[in-house]
Image (tube, rainbow, N blue to C red):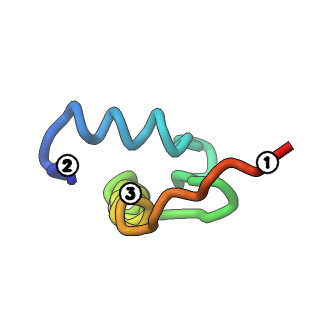
Amino acid sequence: MGDLDSPDYRAYLIEKHGVEHHPALHCHTLGVKIFSSLDEALLYAHHLESVSRRRPPVPPAEP
């Protein structure tokens, strides 16, 4: 798992999870969730990464 202090990992989380900044609203979003700071949004994205790593892979559906 990555380190939230690493600029590369933070950039990875922003890109992978689609974290967006909304200056007019003074917030960040990740999907439908709204966060008051980038750090809060990245902490949530980091949590999603840890959950996805613990989940066993889903086998592809058979045609």
Q: Secondary structure at mark 2?
A: loop
Q: Answer whether residue 14 is visible to the viewer in this image.
A: yes
Q: Residues within 10 Å of mark 3 (few under 14, many from 20)?
A: some
Q: Earlier in the sequence, mark 3 or mark 2?
A: 2
Q: Is residue 12 left or right of residue 28?
A: left
Residue pictured at 62% horizontal, 64% vertical: 33
Quarter location, residue 10: top left
Q: Earlier in the sequence, mark 3 or mark 1?
A: 3
Q: Residues within 10 Å of mark 1 (few under 14, many from 20)?
A: few
Q: Which residue is mark 3?
A: 49
Q: Residues within 10 Å of mark 2 (few under 14, many from 20)?
A: few
Residue pictured at 36% horizontal, 68% vertical: 54
Q: Which residue is mark 2?
A: 2
Q: Are dots 2 and 1 in contact, CB under 8 Å?
A: no
* Residue type for callout 3: Glu
Expressed as whole percent of the image width and height from the top left, the position of residue 7 reads: 19, 34
Expressed as whole percent of the image width and height from the top left, the position of residue 37 reads: 40, 58
* Residue type for callout 2: Gly
Q: Secondary structure at mark 1?
A: loop
Q: Answer whether residue 37 is visible to the viewer in this image.
A: no
Q: Is residue 5 left or right of residue 36?
A: left
Q: Which residue is mark 1?
A: 62
Q: Is residue 24 left or right of residue 28?
A: right
Which is more toward the observer, 53 or 4? 53
Residue lying at the far front in this picture: please name it: 62
Give the Cα distance between marks 3 and 1.
27 Å
Q: Are dots 3 and 2 in contact, CB under 8 Å?
A: yes
